Image: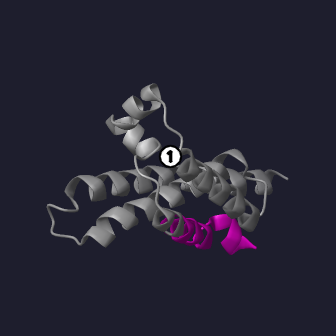
Amino acid sequence: MRENIQIRSGEQVFRLAAVLVVIALGLLLRRFGYAADLPFIIVNYGASALWGAMVYLLVTLFVASSRPAILAVIAMAIAISVELFRLYHTPWLDAFRLTTAGALLLGRIFSLWNMLAYAIGIAAACAFDPARRRR
């Protein structure tokens, strides 16, 4: 039992560190991607893939006892819900979306391509999940 707790806490530390790294990479990509002459596809959809990976990693932090495939489905449901939420408009919500935090958390424009990028990011995060590799 003690060994199982140590393995899980080690996984959680890895996941928390991964969340922080993914957030940093996403912010760097959004901030400096165009200045580094990276193509639009890399900057825009790369950041969306990183956002999807972040959602997966956050889900694993809160629901660590489930199988990675189930966690990936939960993360994808959250990502799709957030994307669909972009279709809902109110003045206060649109004002929040114009802020940096609102743009990063909720986004501004609905895009089916973002859902594909989220799926790619979630699949990549799931593939590198230490719980998945242990099984």
Residue 10 in the image, given as x and y percentages of width and height: 63, 54
Q: Residue at x 60, y 73 (%)?
A: 127
In this rendering, the answer to whether 90 lies above or below 82 is above
Secondary structure mainly formed by the magenta segment: helix
Along the line of sight, the residue nearer the viewer: 76 or 64: 76
Q: Residue at x 47, y 63 (%)?
A: 114
Q: Specify whether residue 131 is painted magenta.
A: yes
Quadrant, the C terminus: bottom right
In this rendering, the answer to whether 101 lies above or below 127 is above
Q: What is the three-letter code of the residue carrying label 1? A: Arg
Residue 96 in the image, given as x and y percentages of width and height: 40, 31
Residue 47 shows up from this direction: yes
In the figure, is residue 23 to the left or right of 6? left
**Crowd rating for badge 1 (residues with CA inside 10 Å; few <14, some 14–19, many 20+):** some
In the figure, is residue 96 to the left or right of 86? left
Among the 4 quarters of the image, the one containing residue 35: bottom left
Along the line of sight, the residue nearer the viewer: 121 or 67: 121
Location of mark 1 (residue): 86
Among the 4 quarters of the image, the one containing residue 126: bottom right
Magenta stretch in the rendered image: 117-135
Q: Helix, strand, or loop for circle 1?
A: loop
Q: Residue at x 70, y 56 (%)?
A: 74
Q: Specify whether residue 129 is painted magenta.
A: yes
Residue 89 in the image, given as x and y percentages of width and height: 49, 37
Residue 17 in the image, given as x and y percentages of width and height: 49, 52
Q: Residue at x 21, y 70 (%)?
A: 38
